């Protein structure tokens, strides 16, 4: 009886579900008075839909246990960021792959540093500004500080820099960039809980950073708590115009950053644990020079021996074993055949959160052919261009504005016309930043593609020189000086000959695809 009742109830439930999930016909209209009734039928039924990912079951309950609805700044609260910073710094300091990855990222993003090109109508003023800024950037080691900021963002989540006056830099402009760690920008305990402040960042009425609180001493400094006057709770407040904050905003309204390698931290730990476990297993097997064993049953005929007894063996010694016993060795099972595959897969997953291809992260391209290597690099180079543009907006343009405001006050350093362009101007004068180009694997292919693009007018000299991180005007002037001097000295200028295309197909069918891929990859990166 109970089984029959259950069957009837289940059938009724299914029929009700079918009616609820049935879609209304597009030909049915609402009632004459907008009552929501369909002609000749009952009230309109809503479609009930479900997302599998929104269901909580016994199988996925633990997996989604840490999912929350915290705001962006509550999710990256000071304690969370402190833990992530410490763990990321630990991995970078102790994991060779982690260190190499963040160094490669900083070197590829910044390289030898950006170069300024002014684009105003005054050519003489442009040249004087570019030369003066280049000398100043060398004096303060701007490329080195930019690389440090990129490293700090990868392992600490953010980097801060103070625009200060430093008369000891040996430059007419005393502006300097003083780097400070993220740990020092914090709200002291006694001032926490304010709605207009997010861990050291004071906000205005519109939510923009208005000022920053910077601790006088690093919280991790051993001498921070020795002096009652200058301890770790004493801070300075700097206006936002004097502070450069470099971090990546992952969520709307986020004001502090987390390390770029945060998703990879558990993977770095697993990689090191697996490597150490493999070495330990191999060493354990190698520590046993030989073992004495018997095939006799438990009560078989074999001379009695003490279990786990150790026998010291001499080199090149022939000996006789006790009756019924044999001499054997422990076979080392480590490293397993999957050891290399495991490391490759983990490194590939680690590098993915940085948009870095495996061969760049591992420093090993043995498993790549030419086309696949260049194809993987396209995503990486695009990510590098995005990072460079972010650096231009967040750091370099602000730095250039501050430098121009001080440089125009130095007598004779810049032309008089620049005072009207920079003093109180809402926008910076027209300018561009050049970064290091990417070295081509096959220079002959790149030269041929470049000549073709120039011949059919699909590029310009400015664009081609920009890909190499050089100023086309300076390069052409230098080339003109060289040609003039060569003619003066009677040196013959080598003629340029364009090789005719081969009539037959290439021996390697992938050559044409490689060239197209290579030209695309090279053209997409400066």
Image: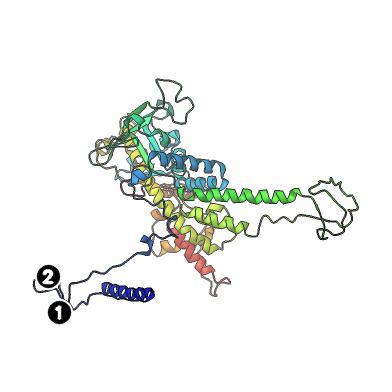
Q: Residue at x 34, y 35 (%)?
A: 200
Q: Which mark is residue 40?
A: 1
What's the magenta region? 249-256
Query: Residue 326 placed where, x, y %?
Result: 84, 57
Q: Residue furthest front?
A: 1
Residue 35 is marked as 2
Q: Quadrant of residue 395?
A: top left
Is residue 429 at all visible to an observer of this figure? Answer: yes
Q: How has the structure been colored for display?
A: rainbow
Q: Which type of secondary structure does the marked residue at label 2 adopt?
A: loop
Residue located 58% across and 61% down the image: 367
Above or below residue 140? Residue 287 is below
Question: Is 355 a magenta residue?
Answer: no
**Crowding at mark 2 (Cα within 10 Å: few <14, some 14-19, many 20+):** few
Q: Main secondary structure of the magenta part?
A: loop
How many badges with numbers are in the image?
2
Residue 97 location (% of width, % of height): 56, 48
Q: In the figure, residue 53 lies in which quadrant?
A: bottom left
Residue sitting nearer the eye, 485 or 275: 275
User: Relative to residue 61, is residue 265 depicted above or below?
Assistant: above
- Residue 196 rendering spot, x and y as whole percentages: 27, 37
The answer for how far apart the CA atoms under marks 2 and 1 are is 13 Å
Say few, some or many: other residues with alpha carbon within 10 Å of mark 1 (under 14 / 14 to 19 / 20 or more).
few
Helix, strand or loop at label 1? It is loop
Q: Quadrant of the N terminus?
A: bottom left
First-in-chain label (2 vs 1): 2
Q: Residue at x 42, y 62 (%)?
A: 453
Q: Is 314 left or right of 252, judged from the image as shown?
A: right
């Amino acid at each position: 009886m109970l089984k029959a009742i259950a069957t009837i109830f289940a059938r009724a439930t299914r029929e009700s579900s079918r009616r609820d999930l049935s879609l209304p016909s597009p030909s049915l209209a609402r009632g004459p008075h907008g009552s929501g009734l369909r002609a000749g039928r009952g009230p309109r039924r809503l479609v009930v839909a479900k997302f599998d990912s929104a269901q909580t079951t016994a199988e996925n309950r633990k997996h989604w246990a840490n999912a929350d609805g915290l705001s962006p700044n509550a999710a990256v609260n000071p304690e969370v960021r402190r833990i992530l910073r410490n763990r990321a710094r630990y991995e970078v300091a102790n994991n060779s792959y982690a260190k190499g990855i963040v160094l490669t990222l900083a070197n590829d993003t910044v390289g030898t540093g950006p170069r300024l090109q002014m684009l105003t109508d005054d050519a003489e003023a442009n040249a004087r500004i570019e030369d003066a800024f280049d000398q100043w950037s060398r004096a303060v080691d701007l490329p080195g500080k930019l690389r440090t900021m990129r490293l700090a963002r990868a392992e600490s989540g953010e980097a801060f820099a103070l625009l200060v006056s430093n008369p000891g830099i040996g430059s007419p402009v005393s502006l300097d960039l003083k780097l400070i760690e993220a740990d020092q920008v914090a709200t002291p305990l006694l001032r926490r809980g304010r709605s207009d402040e997010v861990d050291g960042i004071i906000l205005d009425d519109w939510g923009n950073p208005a000022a920053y609180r910077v601790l006088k001493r690093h919280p991790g400094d051993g001498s921070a708590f020795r002096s009652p006057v200058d301890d770790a709770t004493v801070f300075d407040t700097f206006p936002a115009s004097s502070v450069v904050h470099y971090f990546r905003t992952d969520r709307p309204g986020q004001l502090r950053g987390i390390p770029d390698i945060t998703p990879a931290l558990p993977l770095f730990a697993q990689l090191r644990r697996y490597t150490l476990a493999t070495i330990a297993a191999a060493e354990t097997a190698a520590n046993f020079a030989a073992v004495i064993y018997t095939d006799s049953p438990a009560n078989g005929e074999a001379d009695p021996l003490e279990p786990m007894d150790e026998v010291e063996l001499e080199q090149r010694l022939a000996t006789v074993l006790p009756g019924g016993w044999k001499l054997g060795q422990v076979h080392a099972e480590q490293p397993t055949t999957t050891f290399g595959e495991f490391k490759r897969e983990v490194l590939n997953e680690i590098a993915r959160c940085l948009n870095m291809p495996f061969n760049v992260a591992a420093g090993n391209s043995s498993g790549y052919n030419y086309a696949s290597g260049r194809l993987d690099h396209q995503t990486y180079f695009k990510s590098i261009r995005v990072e460079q543009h972010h650096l231009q907006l967040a750091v370099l343009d602000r730095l250039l504005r501050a430098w121009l405001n001080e440089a125009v006050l130095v007598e004779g350093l810049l032309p008089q016309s620049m005072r009207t362009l920079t003093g109180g101007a809402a926008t910076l004068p027209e300018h561009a930043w050049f970064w290091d180009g990417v070295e081509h694997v096959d220079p002959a292919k790149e030269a041929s593609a470049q000549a073709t693009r120039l011949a059919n007018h699909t590029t310009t000299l400015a664009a081609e020189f920009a890909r190499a991180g050089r100023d086309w005007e300076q390069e052409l002037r230098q080339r003109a000086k060289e040609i003039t001097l060569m003619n003066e000295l009677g040196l013959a200028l080598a003629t340029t000959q364009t090789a005719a295309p081969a009539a037959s197909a290439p021996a390697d069918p992938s050559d044409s695809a490689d060239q197209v891929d290579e030209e695309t990859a090279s053209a997409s990166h400066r």
